[in-house]
Image (spheres, helix red, strand yellow):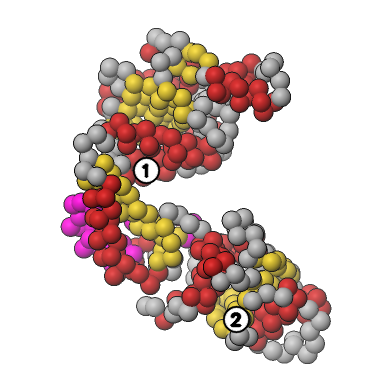
Amino acid sequence: MKAEIITSGTELLLGEVVDTNTPYLARELAAIGVNVYHHTTVGDNPKRLLRAIQIAEDRADMVIVSGGLGPTQDDITKAILAEHLQVELVVDPMSLQKAKTRYNTDEISKGNYQQALILDDSTPLQNDVGMAAGIYKETSTHTYVLLPGPPNEFEYMVSNYLLPKLVEVIGEEEILRSRNMNFYGLPEAKVAERLDDLIQNQTNPTVAVYAKNGIIDVRVTASGPTSAACETLLDAKEEEVLARVGDYFFSYNQTRLHESAFSELATEEATIALAEVLTDGATTDYWSRALEYPDVFKGGNVFTALEHAHTFYQMKDVEDLSPAAQAEHFAKAAKKLYQTDYSVAVIGWGPEDLQDAAQERVAWMSISLPNDEIITQTVDYSRSQNPARWILSLRVSDFVRRAVLGLPDLRNVE
């Protein structure tokens, strides 16, 4: 099956919003055997949107449009497709009731009523995040899919409703199963190089490498007559992948790196605290999002200068100590303050100036273990051409994970 993805929205053409929906959906479709050969972006213009749909019909079996399902006048996607297919727009009772419940009234606005409309004789795709239902519509010649534009609504609907529907439709003879493996510590090119023989000689299963936000994903996709047959193929291929890059593997299915570390701490029923100096609080912000493990991270302190940390922790005669030694002092102090099993201290490099090629961006990390042993590492991002705050938070999270599990640190893996 061939599909074409159309993104609708003038804000996309003007560069005001970055399109993350298309690459996400293209990857997901490829994983279930749907080929995508064209991506199109069009503004909120009825004639141009209709023309984009007509062009897509000439070169694809399935036309997928993202955006234009909202409550405003420029949300035109449903109306344009309904007119094109000569079908009526009808109310989806579940979406209508959802709007009435959310706004606690039976007299909802015209815009919210508009969001509850779907094409006649279509299947609504439930929106558990937002208000506008998606639409799945089959005709004698094509399949049409309408999806919301906001990425959080889009990705949830694709993952939970569209993909299962497509697998059901196209997988009558053979089914497809994918396994997404997450790695940290090697660049994408290096991972691809180590897996080159698997990629070049792939048949079934297939192997693909992706990079997103500092994490490398290796997706293995297998086809077979049954789910069990697919799992057997995936297990064998995963073993081959791990034989090449297993030292950098941390989890499956795009799990965030700090959640992997916190999962290990939760297993131990252990707690952790954090002290950050000259880092803009990047790691504290990152860790605070681990809502799945609320009892693990007991808290952190963020300081904009070393002397502020010295004062807060009532530390004296430390100004002449090296940054590494100060990080160790801060780790001990945070552990005592929060009464935790583990504690981490990070000292960064202060204001970040990417225009200054000579700026040193060196950080010191110390972790205090339950037995009061302290491990300290130095990381240098001086040659990085990208803002390194969020990269540092990933490195700190992996530092913790490796310390908790007793794994070799990244410097000793290569």
Q: Can see residue 115?
A: no
- SS at badge 1: helix
- Crowding near pointer 2: few (<14 within 10 Å), some, many (20+)? many
Q: CA distance from mark 1 to mark 2?
A: 41 Å
| First of labels 1, 2 by sequence position | 1
Which of the two discs, 1 and 2, sits closer to the camera?
2
Range of residues picked out in magenta:
191-214
| Along the viewing direction, whichever of 124 and 24 lies nearer the viewer | 124
Q: Which residue, given by chain and number where applicable, does mark 2 sit on? A: 369
- SS at badge 2: loop
| Along the viewing direction, whichever of 52 and 217 lies nearer the viewer | 217
- Crowding near pointer 1: few (<14 within 10 Å), some, many (20+)? some
- Quadrant (top left, top right, bottom left, bottom right) of the N terminus: top left
Residue 210 on the magenta segment: yes
The image position of residue 279, as x and y in percent, is: 65, 68
The image position of residue 16, as x and y in percent, is: 56, 38
The image position of residue 195, as x and y in percent, is: 27, 63
- Residue 106 vertical placement versus 197 (above, below): above
Measuring 38% from the left and 37% from the top, which residue is drawn there? 163
Measuring 28% from the left and 27% from the top, which residue is drawn there? 61
Kind of residue at badge 2: Leu
Figure quadrant of residue 376: bottom right
- Residue 105 vertical placement versus 208 (above, below): above
Kind of residue at badge 1: Glu
Residue 340 on the magenta segment: no
Measuring 28% from the left and 28% from the top, which residue is drawn there? 60
> Is 286 positioned to the left or the right of 230 in the image?
right
Figure quadrant of residue 114: top right
> Is 222 positioned to the left or the right of 396 in the image?
left
Measuring 81% from the left and 78% from the top, which residue is drawn there? 311
Numbered badge on residue 28: 1
